[in-house]
Amino acid sequence: MHALQRWFDTLRPDLVPKLSTAHDEPERELHLLINQAYEHQNYIGWGHFLRGRLSLQWKHCIAHYYKTRQPGDAYTPTLWARKMIDQVFDLFLALWTCRNGEKHGKDYNEQREIALRMTREEV
């Protein structure tokens, strides 16, 4: 979320927030995979993430998570990626709609008021 907030603020996300990969860490392997996925997503860009272009490294994380947790055969990394992309699209479109509504007006009357206000400011 921090990386996405920085992207919204037109800043490059910070370097990878490293999860613990100490040898005594029970989730060491999963943390290594998450760190790699975050690094790769940072490399290709969080703008791509919001447009549904997730790093393939996330599928490796989910595959490992499902292998250790064994939630059932219906849970696959590919299905997770599809559902994740659907959710990200919904989020991105909601943000876009909200932003445009605030900037340009949510209906015809608001659009007209904003246009009139901008015209008056220019004059």
Image: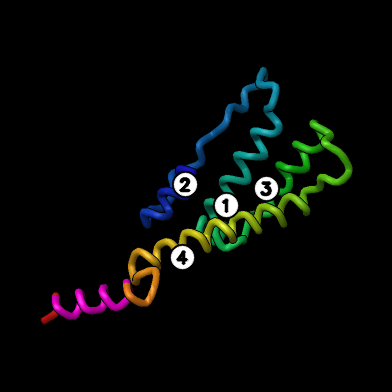
Q: Position of residue 119 (x, y in %)?
A: 18, 80
Q: Quadrant of residue 23?
A: top right
Task: Work out how far the residue at label 4 is from the one at label 1, CA to CA, in angstroms.
Answer: 25 Å
Residue type at numbered disc 4: Thr
Residues at marks 4 and 3, CA–CA distance in whole angstroms: 28 Å
Rate crowding at label 3 as few (under 14), some (14 to 19) or many (20 or more) other CA atoms within 10 Å.
many
Q: Is residue 44 visible?
A: no
Q: Residues within 10 Å of mark 1 (few under 14, many from 20)?
A: many
Kindly state the secondary structure of the residue where label 3 is placed: helix
Distance, label 4 to label 2, CA atoms, is 21 Å
| Mark toward the start of the polypeptide (2 vs 1) | 2
Secondary structure beneath label 4: helix
* Left or right: 32, with 102 as reference point: right
In the picture, measured across the screen, residue 83 lies left or right of residue 108, that is right
Q: Position of residue 123 (x, y in %)?
A: 10, 82
Q: Secondary structure at mark 1?
A: helix
Mark pair 3, 2: CA separation: 16 Å
Which residue is identified by label 2?
A: 3
Furthest-front residue in this view: 109
Q: Who comes first in sequence, dot 4 or dot 3?
A: 3
Residues in magenta?
Answer: 110-120
Question: What's the amino acid at mark 3?
Answer: Trp
